[in-house]
Image (cartoon, rainbow, N blue to C red):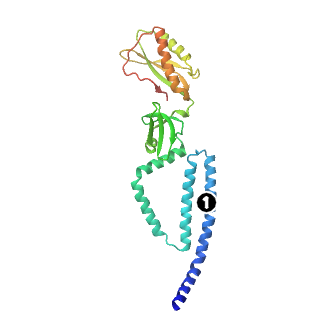
Amino acid sequence: METVEKYLELITEMLIQYAPKVLLAAVVLWIGFRIINRIVNTGIKAMERGGLGHDVRPFLASMLGILLKTLLVFSAAGIVGIETTSFVAALAAAGFAIGLALQGSLGNFAAGIIILIFRPYKAGDLVTIGDFTGHVTEVQIFNTVIATLDNRTVILPNSEAINGAITNLSTRQILRIDIETPMPYSEDFEHVERVILEALRNTPGVLSEPAPFVGIQSFDSHSIILAVRPYAEAEAYWNVYFAVTRNVKRALSENGVGVAYAEGVEMGKIGK
């Protein structure tokens, strides 16, 4: 009987000691979760006003909610009297070990967040990243997926994309097409210039403003290298590029311009 009385006294003491703390912790959790939900919703609206894409907003909102709720739970545990120091230390040690094991993936993850927030490119943009040129089909948390111009799918780690030079060709509405054409020394430049300019004016997609340009770029041992510089809308770049090369070749042949052989002539650079 005395043992039962001791247990009852102990339970009573514990209730007197911990019941107010547990009740207070429960109230803090209830109010805290409601406040956190409002903060997250406000954050989502702020991200929408800031122009962040719909693909990154849910992720950032989820991360914000998890972080705030974790801090709230630790605070409630401290109110009850639970020692959280050792638990936090163990959690930090586990996080450090996981971070070392996944440092490559975490680097790609961080780079993905940077890309999604600062948006150096987005899905649908025509970009050159490293050795690859193509349209971005998807920006993932760890990788960027590019459909190259020869219809290959390239999955590029975000850390490689963010650490190198990125050329986003879709940020400009107008692009310059750079073509180098060899001309024999025996030909008259003014005549060839008129022929090429006429071919450019008759090529669908070549813009009249800015006006196309033809000039002498350099001299080599076999020929004179001409710089042919028409402009086109960014979306029509490749169609216009191939149409220009075809029409310039046809125009030169029809006007009796002789064939020139040049060494090291590069064709088809995208104008910067």
What is the quadrant of residue 68 in the picture? bottom right
Q: Nearer the viewer, residue 125 or 165?
A: 125
Q: Residue at x 64, y 54 (%)?
A: 42
Residue at the front extreme, as displayed: 1
Q: Residue at x 50, y 24 (%)?
A: 177
Residue 135 is at least partly visible in this image: yes
Q: Looking at numbered disc 1 in the image, what kind of residue is underneath it?
A: Ile
Q: Residue at x 49, y 12 (%)?
A: 251
Residue at the bottom extreme, as displayed: 2
Residue 189 is at least partly visible in this image: no
* Element carrying mark 1: helix
Decide: is 112 above or below 235. Answer: below
Q: Which residue is mark 1?
A: 36
Decide: is 13 above or below 245. Answer: below
> Residue 140, position in %: x, y?
50, 45
What is the quadrant of residue 36 in the picture? bottom right
